[in-house]
Image (tube, grey):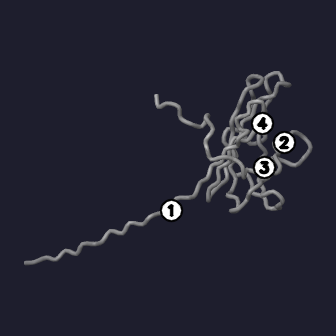
Amino acid sequence: MEIKIEKQLEVVRETTSPTTIKLYNPTGLDHKLDHRMKSIEFSDEFTRIDFIYRSSHQYKNGGWIQMESNAYISPAGSTMKYRLLRTIGIPIAPLKHYFKRKGEFHSYSLIFPALPAGTAKIDIIEKEAPGNYFNFYGIDYSKWITVPHPMDLERSKN
């Protein structure tokens, strides 16, 4: 008796991974600045902005930081607001991160929805109101670089 077995062809589908671009702020390495943007990462799904903050010298223990839940980014000159999705390393108000000493460095990240293609300048708004809020206007990242900062490179696998 003869049995015929048909071999099925295996079809492999290639999936496209999301496009991700990370730009580094050349002034992100300037340790004289108390609050600076280190980098911005753009993908099809999100915009991530990394910051470095140095605690204040005017407060006994360096003070505290927090982020307002209604923070947003906006293409400069636009009324469109991309609301904060998530934070990494900084609590949402009313919670606070308290520093242990003056001059302490702290890194944190803010995650927002993806920005439209072609956006070249953004405003980062924690809150537009009297007081001390982390607001940055007209951030032009067109001259930022794709070369990672030395602090982002793995030095050893020991």
Q: Secondary structure at mark 1?
A: loop
Tags 4 and 2 touching, CB below 8 Å: no
Q: Label 3 sits on what residue type?
A: Ile
What residue appears at the point 75 percent right and 22 percent down from the top-left corner?
101
Mark 2 vs mark 3, foreground winner is: 3
Q: Label 4 sits on what residue type?
A: His
Q: Which residue is mark 2?
A: 133
CA separation in Å, label 4 and label 2:
12 Å
CA separation in Å, label 1 and label 2:
39 Å
Mark 3 vs mark 1, foreground winner is: 3
Is 31 situated left or right of 1 in this image?
right
Ranked by sequence position, the earlier of labels 2 and 3 is: 2
CA separation in Å, label 4 and label 3:
14 Å
CA separation in Å, label 3 and label 1:
30 Å
Ranked by sequence position, the earlier of labels 1 and 2 is: 1
Q: Which residue is mark 1?
A: 16
Tags 1 and 4 touching, CB below 8 Å: no
Q: Label 2 sits on what residue type?
A: Tyr
* Mark 1 nearby-residue class (10 Å; few <14, some 14–19, many ≥20): few
Ranked by sequence position, the earlier of labels 4 and 3 is: 4
**Residue 61: x, y in percent?**
79, 23
Q: Which residue is mark 4?
A: 35
Tags 2 and 3 touching, CB below 8 Å: no
* Mark 2 nearby-residue class (10 Å; few <14, some 14–19, many ≥20): some
Query: Quarter holding the N terminus?
Result: bottom left
Ranked by sequence position, the earlier of labels 4 and 2 is: 4
Mark 4 vs mark 3, foreground winner is: 3
**Residue 7: x, y in percent?**
24, 72
Q: Secondary structure at mark 2?
A: loop
